[in-house]
Amino acid sequence: MNAVKGWVWGLLESNERTEVPMTIDDPNAPPVQQDSEGAQRLRGNLGIIQLVFTVLAFNGPLGVVAAFAPVVIGYGNGIGAPAAYIAAAAIVGLFAVGFIKMSRHITNPGGFYSFVTAGLGKEVGLGASFLAVTCYYILLLAVYAVAGLYLETAIGGLSWWLWALVLQAVVGVFGYFNLDFSAKALSVCLCLEVLFVAVYDVFVVAKGGAKGISAGSFLPEHIFSGNVGIALLFGMLCMGGFEVTVIFRDEVRDPDRTIPRATYAFIALIGLVYAVSTWAIIQAIGPEDAATQTAADPTGSFLNTLSAYVGTIAADLVVPLLITAGFAAVLATHNVLARYAFNLGVDEVLPQRIGFAHPSHGSPHRASAIISTLALVGFTAFVVLGAEPKLLYAQLSGAFGYGLITLMLITSVSVMVFMARQRPDDTTIWHRQVAPALALICLAIVLWLATTNISVLITAGTGAVAGMLALLYGSVLLGAAYAWKLRTTRPETYAKIGRQ
């Protein structure tokens, strides 16, 4: 461990942040972009399609359809489950109205961190950034666990945790280069995932389902049956990832056009895919039996119907595709977390050297190395403690979902305050007040549902629930307290928090 620590800090100290050297392997590379204050900026050349695929990879469509859709059916509102995804997409769409408009006036690609700072001040903004880093770190450990399990199942030869360590090494290499490099790999993975899910849906419909095709899922008596709160809660959790479009602002072509289009395209596509695929699972099992069977066997419901409707070849292919889905999710999560760390380094909240972009690739290579090291440390701790991978993934995913909803609620308040204060010329009352207010109300309801049903998200007992809540809310308080301390001890650093 000391050797790893020495290597990482050696990397951080290898170049001063103010230097922009050229690399030997690419003598014609353009210089690293800098803003008016000399802060380094990342660079890339992502288009709309590449950005949508990068965000989709973070979400993992095949994994959601296989693992989460049956849970929404079995433990949520039964055959009305498809409506939960439509409702979740609508809430996120409302949130995105003000969020995307505000992004045109936020030049700092810090995601929730920069948005909350601009609206609610530096203390709350830094608290939100600490919460975001905590959430994405939790999710990173979760997806490493499930990806390692997929590799053990499909290939064998090594234990799940050894496969996860191999995957960490591969992701570390990809994270060293810029987002264009990662996007090429993610695009291939996502095309295979989406195609596979679409084939499943088509085969179920073509064969008429178990008892004929029915639209009963969209009748009010079914939509509001069962536990609507749980259905909506998991529906929102499955929408995670849309917000990272703004984090890649410096790495896309024409961000003022690319980011809005990619964000709305993602929300519409993912809402439609999950609603249709959940409906297809219900049709494949049969509306009368869908809730009972998915509750009894959430993880096997999709796989069983896949074999019955598409064939054994498809059933054999699904595990390798789940592996690519796991890889895509790990890489996308790693990239998001590295960019949060990079921006905190640029603002000197974290060590300044972390905010140094690679002179040739324009990537957050130092931040990526730090994230790889932290992932190794956290993952190793879980392995030493004997954590079971399925349980680990479920608990950590639940914690991430709760934190994401909290972040969105805080950001909604920030958007409303910012819009009321600035009244940008390119906005209307719909962007400034109506949509953000509706999103805030909906998110407050979802957060209340998440809190009152926390045992469904975190099933490891009251101790685990208390620990999770303390970690998430504690990270907000810690960030705010640190900002308050910087205001008096390092005012020059305080002034840089979330700077535009």
Image: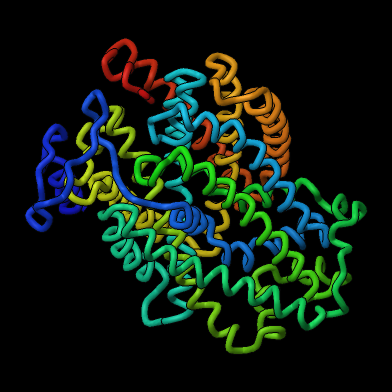
Q: Position of residue 283 (x, y in %)?
A: 80, 72
Quarter assignment of residue 424: top right
- Residue at image point 38% right, 52% down: 46
| Residue 99 against residue 481 in the figure, above or below | below
| Residue 440 against residue 296 in the figure, above or below | above
Q: Position of residue 480 (x, y in %)?
A: 44, 22
Type of colouring: rainbow
Q: Position of residue 300 (x, y in %)?
A: 66, 74
| Residue 284 against residue 485 in the figure, above or below | below
- Residue at image point 42% right, 47% down: 137
In depth, the one of 476 and 359 nearer the eye is 359
Q: Decide if residue 470 is on the left or right side of residue 273.
A: left
Q: Decide if residue 364 is on the left or right side of residue 413.
A: left
Residue 135 visible in the picture: no
In depth, the one of 273 and 153 nearer the eye is 273
- Residue at image point 35% right, 70% down: 162
Furthest residue in direction top, as rendered: 488
Q: Position of residue 498 (x, y in %)?
A: 38, 25
Circle count: 0
Furthest residue in direction left, as rendered: 24
In depth, the one of 109 and 121 nearer the eye is 109
Quadrant assignment for the C terminus: top left
Furthest residue in direction bottom, as rendered: 312
Q: Decide if residue 226 is on the left or right side of residue 117.
A: right
Residue 254 visible in the picture: yes
- Residue at image point 75% right, 70% down: 280
